[in-house]
Image (cartoon, rainbow, N blue to C red):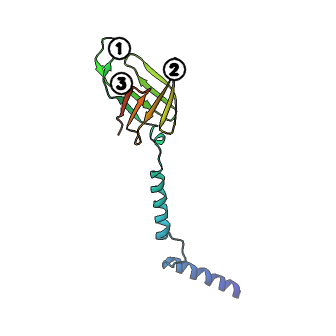
Amino acid sequence: MRSLALYCLSISLSLAALACGDSASPTTSDSETSDTSDSSATSDAQLTVCDMIPGAKFQTVEQFAQGPGGPLAHLSLSFDETEYARDHGDYLEEGMYTCADSTLMGSDANNGEDWTATINEDATMLVIDGSSEYERVDP
């Protein structure tokens, strides 16, 4: 009976210490908080150009005719995780792409033609096959 009383007293003291904010209670220290925020800042800084492409929308710097004799407009280029869509004014090209070391490589699903694009370091401009310039337009 005496050991049961001591056990109950021990539980009561532990609960009282927790209720009073005893340092033995599980809390997050300032060093743990700063470690977490430091690691997220580091992961943001490690984004590569290729990480910035999925979800990106670009348009041509120049305007082109929308079909034979059509009005002039910027042509669009958009990317998801693995596929792209590129407007040529009179038809839409779609296909798969990959990205490595600031270079995109794509293949038109309709005709199998391949293309290569270089991307600047903040992924705001790209040039396809050395001639078609696109600027990023998504926010």
Q: Nearer the viewer, mark 2 or mark 1?
A: 2
Q: Are marks 2 and 1 in contact (CB under 8 Å)?
A: no
Residue 100: image location, x then y, percent: 52, 37
| Depicted 37 relative to depicted 77: above or below | below
Per the model, the C-alpha gap separating discs 3 and 1 is: 11 Å
Looking at the rendered structure, the secondary structure element under dot 2 is: loop
Q: Residues within 10 Å of mark 1 (few under 14, many from 20)?
A: few
- Name the residue rendered at 47%, 55% in the picture: 42
Residue 16: image location, x then y, percent: 53, 80
- Name the residue rendered at 42%, 27% in the picture: 130
Q: Which residue has dot 3 on it? A: 75
Q: Are marks 3 and 1 in contact (CB under 8 Å)?
A: no
| Depicted 74 relative to depicted 3: above or below | above
Give the label on residue 113, or none: 2
Q: Quadrant of residue 10?
A: bottom right
Residue 82: image location, x then y, percent: 52, 33
Front one among 38 and 46: 46
| Sequence order check, earlier mark of 2 and 1 | 1
Q: Amino acid at mark 2?
A: Glu
Residue 120: image location, x then y, percent: 41, 38
Compared across the picture, whether 132 is left or right of 104 comes to: left
Q: Quadrant of residue 86?
A: top left
- Name the residue rendered at 39%, 25% in the picture: 131
| Depicted 7 relative to depicted 43: above or below | below
Front one among 10 and 46: 46
Q: Quadrant of residue 112?
A: top right
Q: Which residue has dot 1 on it? A: 67
Query: Which quadrant is home to the C terminus?
Result: top left
| Sequence order check, earlier mark of 3 and 2 | 3
Compared across the picture, whether 34 is left or right of 1 comes to: left
Q: Residues within 10 Å of mark 2 (few under 14, many from 20)?
A: few
